[in-house]
Image (spheres, rainbow, N blue to C red):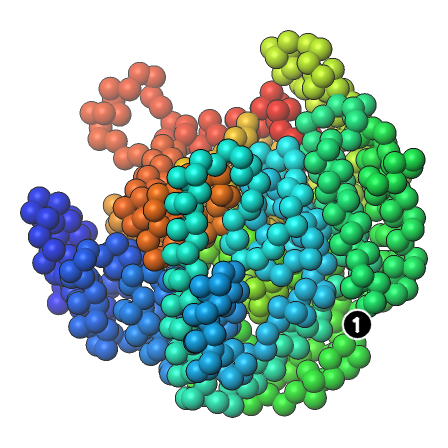
Amino acid sequence: MVYDDRLLIVYLSQVYKETQEEIWLEYAVSCFLQGIKYGVSNSRSHLAHVLYLLSFDTSNEPVGRAFDKYLDQIPHWVWLSWVPQLLLSLQRTEAPHCKLVLLKIATVYPQALYYWLRTYLLERRDIANKSELGRLRMQQSISGAGTTSLGLSDGSARVQTHAGVSLTTDNQVHQGPQSATVGGSHDGGNSHGQEHERSTGVEGNAHGGHDQPSQQSSSTITEGQGTLRRNGMLGLVASAASAFDAAKDIMEALRSKHTNLASELETLLTEIGSRFVTLPEERLLAVVNALLHRCYKYPTATTAEVPQSLKKELSGVCKACFSADAVNKHVEFVREYKQDFERDLDPESTATFPATLSELTERLKHWKNVLQSNVEDRFPAVLKLEEESRVLRDFHVVDVEVPGQYFTDQEVAPDHTVKLDRVGADIPIVRRHGSSFRRLTLIGSDGSERHFIVQTSLTPNARSDERILQLFRVMNRMFDKHKESRRRHICIHTPTIIPVWSQVRMVEDDLMYSTFLEVYENNCARNNREADLPITHFKEQLNQAISGQISPEAVVDLRLQAYNEITKTLVTDGIFSQYMYKTLPSGNHLWAFKKQFAIQLALSSFMSFMLQIGGRTPNKILFAKNTGKIFQTDFHPAYDANGMIEFNEAVPFRLTRNMQAFFSHFGVEGLIVSAMCAASQAVVSPKQIQHIWHHLAMFFRDELLSWSWRRPMHMPSAPAPAGGCLSPMDLKLKVTTNVDNVIGRIKGVAPQNYSEEEDNAMDPPQSVQRGVTELVEAALMPRNLCMMDPTWHPWF
């Protein structure tokens, strides 16, 4: 069976558009699945198309019929990389079809499913419990077989005692059992996915829960909109309860088939989720660091009074960190810090509370230094497994595999995987910019070691990190099939993320990781200079602009002047170059690192532009000092009130002075520009453009579903179906619009193939790289850089 899949797609799509006969949808899915059945080259790339058609199937379910017909005839392993999408579909109309797939995976590849299924079960239960209707349904469901009878430990209570407090921006919503509204996030103290996200304040409402809509601005909601929104939430709760039922059936099938394995996995995850959490001092340090950054980001003059919303946040911090629960569980911590902390930072202490924003900033700096010194001096750098978890020390593993072996899109025989031999005896504490993590070493049966850090207090956007890595893996396969990208060895680094609970996950770590901000802070420490001095200087220079004392036209010139002063007197362009010269042992190593790092940075820049991802502060850029591989945290788009990607930064991606100096003019134009061109050309090549369209469509489907479930109440919405807060037509329109916008951006910078006549007609001749070159020039332009937020460190 040999066919040209591109012609098939075009033909079937065209016929369906012309006739609107559903039989053509059934023919299309039948052809795609038969291609997979018979092993036709490139046929598995159509699974995204199949799932997209299934997600928006018509009422007669022609796609569902063909899907069920051929399901038993295709190998089960082809679905392994689609487990997150299949689980999310359990809350939608295509749930019966996806449940069949997941049941088959549960019996053959239980460890490819268990981590995600377990977390999904706990999350759906939490959502369904938000209302009386949901609780009644859940009680009926759990009376038959609840999470306890399924062998799942409920981590909610434990996480609540350890997770501390969570800080969110004004357009984010709490996820999971949080005890208050302010705290450190999982990526170094910045609580929000994108630093640029419209954050002029922080919510002060103490509400928690998965995807629970926030309650602010209720006065702006009309009665009709409120009714629609309540109906939407009832639909969401009902769909969560039905999704819980479906997931429960899958878990029961898995446990009945693999009883011993499920018991081992549950023991492992329960210990990891409860034993390797941060201490109160570490959580308070993350809180203070996040609040300090919030002060820097506040669009208020440093001489102005502390904004009311910030006072509200500080009050919430004091109540949460030194609550009655904390007094009972952490007596020494409360005794040491409570009185002084509340005296300095509690707005209710009117006699001692700072009068201006600059005074509050100085207080927070003081507390950051005190806590950082205490954390580093009092607590060991390495913990011992036997002291932290005797269960894991004595854990005799039989069937558990080292996680993360099913992401290759290749057949994996369960009996040929690397088994988990033991957990390493040493547990280093990784400290990055105010946040602390425990790093576990999982030792495989083949002697290999894989390192994972345990992250807690996750934001609602944490699932987006998993989705973006899945998209990266798809794009890596496209890069491997394109000549120009393959010859440059273009490949995005994709570490493994394993969910433990809704608020806890394990992220694969590299022992050689360092952040871009650590390089700058090391330079400041060596020169005995305060790291935040440029930010403070920049804010002070802009006081008159913020106060409205000068015209808007002069604000840009004032920002540029402040930026130029910082680059001349405070931050040089050779800091990163000096750091790498001293880190790498020889010129050969430096050359290899520079080449790999340039390609990795080019790919990150390309993805930032393609998906309009901003907020690339230096603390979110992790790079391996030996290989040059880059991993960016909180790397996902932000969405506006209409579900469209929102991006409001002056530069298309991060390429600042120190990076430019390290690569030199030749590295930027030779390595970075050419790698970005090759990447863009690979994904919109004639053979791949249909595939990337549908992969992006599935990515945005999941993103927008999650976005709609946690959307604030003051945003209008249409009546919600059972699958969530968006109607199928509305969801499909938002998905296709976002995808078309992304594809349009890629085509705008990808080198085009011109005929000889077209090429000769251009006067003067245009470079095929001009689209990318213009982006690089915009990223390096001082006038654009000076418009960035000071916490973005545009001068570094």
In this image, 675 relative to 355: left or right?
left
Q: Residue at x 26, y 25 (%)?
A: 759
Whether residue 631 appears in this view of the structure is no
Judging by the rendered image, the residue that carries numbered circle 1 is 383
Q: Quadrant of residue 374?
A: bottom right
Rendered view: 57 above or below 394: above
Above/below status of 239 relative to 404: above
Label 1 is placed on what type of residue? Leu
In this rendering, position of residue 142 left or right of residue 580: left
- Is residue 240 or residue 130 the one in the foreground? 130
Q: Residue at x 44, y 82 (%)?
A: 144
- How many other residues sit within 10 Å of disc 1, few (<14), some (14-19) or many (≥20)? some
Residue 185 is situated, as x and y percent measured from the top left of the image, at 66, 52
Q: Position of residue 642 (x, y in %)?
A: 41, 37
Residue displayed at 43% across by 49% down: 230
How many dots with numbers?
1
532 relative to 711, above or below = above
Task: Tell me the residue at 68%/14% (across/down).
Answer: 548
| Residue 709 image point, x, y percent | 45, 52
Q: Residue 680 lies in what quarter of the image?
A: top left
